[in-house]
């Protein structure tokens, strides 16, 4: 423990939060950093540190970590050396510096829009009117309430919504403001066909489908579940606090120049757009953009981005691989065995592990847990990095069906890679909490640990190559995989090189001396821009992973001999193309009948211009130039 924590001293206690609390107070009053290996009572020790600081104006820096539920409490037949190795591994990973994510400030002035039936909307307005500036947009023919100066009322139908806390934009149809003046029955004014509104807080009481996908991740949006009682009071309790300045983490980093979304209006990669659960990502010309107000930081976009144009600030790939690598290394040093790894969420996943530890057999003794904010963050590269670090299995604990669906495609991609290396695809699984107790296949490590250096594609390639002694053929991958080759139909291709000019990663190139399309497979991300660009529909994508050295070098996909100018011999164009043009025009078109104009097609640019200007029958030829007259000519005359 002392070695794993890099500590000067390791103290074993029995009940630090109870009868031995004075031991914690003693060390918190000293000068060294303090690491308390208890997660359950972390809040107690934080309060103790505050009390110590108040008493002596000093408290040692405190860090807490759970090694009991995640490693100590396991099945009765668990091997103690494995449990101790897991505890040391968790402590070692906790010493790694946490990544720093920038934050932005969001301003909310408390402008609130409540949409729903009259009765519920007016009731909600009464609950929040003291803290928020409320407008109720009712959507039924319920009884009109007496006007109130505390909030406004109108009638209409919500047709669109966009934004997040502090910047909602709502669209309505048939909006009718309440007409409060006069005596007698209240009524609404004439309807406006369309209307727009902006607000800081949006409360949706309509009872149907939420206005946003993954609505629980949308800051400032409150949706009342019609199946639950007490929803209005629950929402009001939180909504009243949505006034003032708030810090919003900027979870992602976007490098637009790396994005392979589009080129010259030709569609390409849409992987991040397809997986974003909050619709925070949208197309913006040749690249995508991400609304940082809406982004909830799940990391799905970074997990599927083939060029690393999108990376995460909070859980960067490098930080995940480093923690995975450190834990595997420490575990192996103590047990000389391969551990297994399970990714889980910090909230529901940690709670499930704690319940298993207390009321069941707990985690299997060789299963090391790694908590993340969202398991959506795990893609095939993170999974393969774990195998590269030496884990025997990689499991993903899904909290619900949404989590399971979110990681399905990336898990299937990683399983295809395992299958291609003659390893069992079952070494990667999405599991439920009850399966955390099960023993795994720890019989053989897929490979000796590899050096986890480089980006996602580099580590994936190195790991796959190391997992099998010999891979003779490229590994076939599922459709949509970010690795692969392209095939060119030579009968259709005219070597126009449009694909080469628009390839965003440089996978396609041309030959400097002859008409030829060259291809470097390792650089191809299967974005599909070449396929959508080709005017002859001659290109087909072929998802596969080639880990041979040949994939690192350019190879010719299609090429032909150049046509040599009939005047100067300079090669230009493609021989087959020039010959086809001559065949179609010679004696077929009026400009090429009974003349030698067809010879112009067989000339390079320079010779063609000269022939057009200087030939005796050239259409652009000028007359004979007059002799230049000098002063002597004038004097002689």
Image (tube, rainbow, N blue to C red):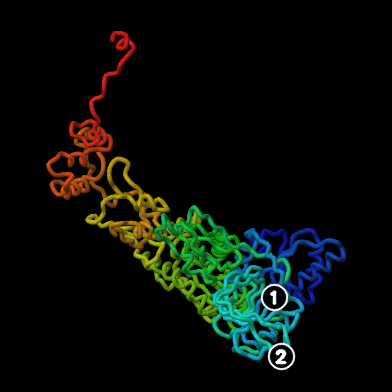
Q: Position of residue 134 (x, y in %)?
A: 70, 77
**Residue occupying image coordinates x 78% and y 69%:** 24
**Residue occupying image coordinates x 26% and y 40%:** 572
319, 543: nearer the viewer = 543
Assign the C terminus to one quadrant of the image.
Answer: top left
376, 235: nearer the viewer = 235
274, 379: nearer the viewer = 274
Q: Position of residue 13 (x, y in %)?
A: 73, 72
**Residue occupying image coordinates x 26% and y 43%:** 573
Left or right of 626, for residue 400? right
Q: Where does label 1 land, which residue?
A: 40
Q: Where does label 2 land, which residue?
A: 184
Q: Nearer the viewer, mark 1 or mark 2?
A: 2
Query: Secondary structure under badge 2?
Result: loop
| Residue 27, quarter of picture | bottom right
Query: Secondary structure under badge 1?
Result: loop
């Amino acid at each position: 423990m002392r070695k794993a924590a890099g500590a000067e001293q390791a103290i074993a206690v029995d009940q630090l939060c109870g009868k031995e609390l004075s031991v914690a107070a003693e060390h918190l009053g000293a000068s060294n950093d303090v690491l308390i290996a208890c997660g359950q009572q972390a809040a107690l020790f934080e309060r103790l540190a505050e009390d110590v600081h108040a008493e002596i104006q000093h408290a040692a820096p405190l860090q807490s970590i759970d090694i009991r539920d995640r490693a100590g409490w396991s099945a009765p037949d668990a091997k103690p050396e494995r449990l101790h190795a897991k505890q040391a591994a968790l402590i070692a990973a906790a010493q790694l510096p946490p990544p720093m994510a920038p934050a932005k400030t969001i301003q909310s002035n408390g402008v609130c829009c409540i949409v729903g039936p009259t009765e519920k909307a007016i009731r909600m307005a009464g609950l929040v009117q003291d803290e928020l500036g409320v407008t109720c947009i009712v959507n039924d023919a319920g009884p009109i309430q007496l006007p109130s100066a505390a909030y406004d009322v109108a009638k209409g139908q919500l047709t669109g919504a966009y934004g997040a806390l502090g910047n909602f934009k709502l669209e309505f149809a048939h909006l009718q403001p309440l007409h409060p003046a006069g005596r007698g029955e209240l009524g609404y004014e004439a309807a406006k066909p369309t209307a727009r509104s902006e607000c800081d807080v949006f409360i949706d009481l309509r009872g149907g489908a939420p206005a946003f996908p993954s609505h629980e991740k949308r800051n400032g949006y409150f949706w009342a579940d019609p199946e639950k009682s007490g929803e209005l009071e629950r929402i009001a309790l939180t909504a009243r606090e949505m006034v003032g300045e708030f810090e919003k983490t900027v979870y992602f980093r976007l490098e637009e120049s790396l994005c392979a979304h589009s080129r010259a209006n030709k569609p390409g990669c849409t992987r991040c757009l397809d997986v974003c659960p909050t619709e925070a990502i949208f197309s913006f010309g040749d690249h995508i953009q991400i609304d940082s107000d809406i982004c909830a930081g799940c990391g799905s976009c970074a997990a599927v981005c083939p060029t690393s144009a999108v990376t995460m600030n909070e859980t960067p790939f490098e930080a995940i691989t480093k923690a995975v690598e450190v834990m595997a290394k420490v575990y192996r040093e103590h047990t000389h065995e391969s551990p297994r790894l399970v990714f889980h969420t910090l909230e529901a996943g940690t709670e499930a592990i704690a319940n298993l530890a207390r009321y069941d057999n707990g985690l299997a003794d060789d299963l090391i847990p790694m908590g993340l904010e969202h398991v959506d963050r795990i893609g095939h590269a993170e999974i393969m990095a774990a195998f590269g670090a030496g884990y025997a299995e990689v499991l993903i604990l899904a909290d619900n069906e949404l989590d399971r669906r979110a990681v399905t495609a990336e898990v299937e991609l990683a399983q295809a890679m395992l299958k291609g290396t003659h390893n069992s695809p079952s070494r990667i699984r999405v599991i439920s909490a009850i399966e955390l107790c099960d023993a795994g296949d720890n019989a053989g490590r897929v490979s000796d640990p590899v050096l986890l250096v480089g980006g996602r594609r580099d580590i994936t390639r190195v790991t796959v190559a190391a997992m099998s002694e010999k891979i003779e053929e490229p590994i076939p991958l599922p459709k949509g995989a970010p690795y692969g080759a392209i095939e060119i139909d030579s009968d259709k291709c005219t070597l126009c090189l449009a694909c080469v000019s628009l390839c965003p990663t440089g996978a396609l190139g041309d030959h400097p001396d002859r008409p030829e399309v060259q291809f470097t497979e390792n650089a191809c991300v299967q974005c599909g821009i070449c396929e959508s660009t080709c005017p002859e529909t001659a290109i087909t994508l072929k998802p596969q992973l080639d880990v041979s050295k040949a994939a690192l070098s350019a190879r010719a996909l299609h090429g032909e001999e150049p046509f040599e100018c009939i005047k100067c011999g300079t090669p230009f164009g493609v021989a087959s193309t020039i010959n086809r043009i001559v065949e179609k025009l010679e004696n077929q078109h009026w400009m090429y009948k009974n003349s030698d104009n067809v010879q112009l097609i067989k000339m390079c640019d320079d010779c063609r211009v000269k022939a057009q200007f200087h030939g005796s029958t050239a259409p652009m030829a000028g007359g004979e130039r007059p002799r230049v007259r000098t002063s002597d000519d004038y004097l002689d005359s």
